[in-house]
Amino acid sequence: MDAMLANGQVSVVILMALSAALFIALSELARSYFVTKRAELKLADEARERHFLALHKLIGNDDEELVSHEVKRFLLQFSAAICTKAIAKRIAQGIKSRKKPKLCPERQHAVEALMGEISLMVKQRPDLADALVDVINFGFAAMVLRWPETEIMMARALMLDAEVKNDGIRQKATCVFAQVDDQTLAVGQGAIQAAVG
């Protein structure tokens, strides 16, 4: 009887030790996740700040030949889109599916206008070209890092960046514009004037 009692006590001690080890392991896993997520959110905040600094530099530029109203509208629409969780989730799902996004002619024209202005700016005002690329890259990075549902885009964004710089910009802009509803794109001339003025 004493032997059975001793075996029972050993089993309870082993069970308690295993429970404590499991608790410690799960606690460490949770701590590690939250430390990582906090770091991602800090990076997202930094990317968001750099996105808006670059956006302000472009929106505030009065030289219509360097930064057209069409591109300013596109940048405001892009910025509004990446700040919307539902749109970010749709973008992540689209990227995860690996289907090439399709754009309507109007949106495709906006992306091509953006790419054309980048080409011109590289020659005339490299600082503005860099700002335009920063709006897209840092905006995309902020969106990717902000929500857990969009983390799948991180690997794809790195792949896009490994490609030619302007093609990566085209792909990111296309990914965003393919998932945006028309209401989000409703940035009128008044909003552009308010941002510029």
Image (cartoon, rainbow, N blue to C red):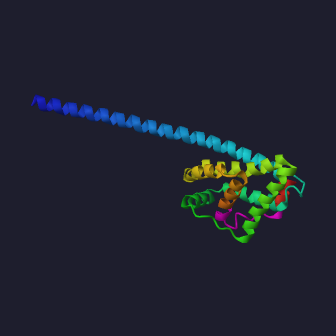
In the image shown, does 136 or 89 lie closer to the viewer?
136
The magenta stretch spans residue 187: yes
Residue 172 in view here: yes
In the rendered view of the protein, which quadrant contains the N terminus? Answer: top left
The quarter of the picture where residue 64 lies is bottom right
Extreme-bottom residue of the structure: 105
| Image quadrant in which the C terminus is located | bottom right
Of residues 174 and 146, the one nearer the viewer is: 174
72 left or right, relative to 88: right
Query: Can residue 60 be seen?
Result: no
Q: Residue 40 lies in what quarter of the image?
A: top right
Residue at image coords 64%, 52%: 160
Residue 98 location (% of width, % of height)? 56, 61
Residue, far left: 1
Left or right: 43 with respect to 37? right
Residue 135 x, y percent position in the rendering: 74, 50
Q: In the picture shown, does residue 146 fall above or below 1?
A: below
194 part of magenta stretch: no
Q: Decide whether the magenta segment is chiefly helix, strand or loop.
A: loop
In percent of the image, x 73 and y 60: which residue is there? 77
Is 80 positioned to the left or the right of 57 in the image? left
The number of numbered discs placed on residues in the rendered structure image is 0
Magenta-colored span: 177-189
Q: Position of residue 35 (x, y in %)?
A: 54, 37
Estimate the x, y position of residue 190 in percent, counting from the top left.
83, 62
Q: Could you tell me which residue is drawn at 78 percent across and 47 percent down?
A: 130
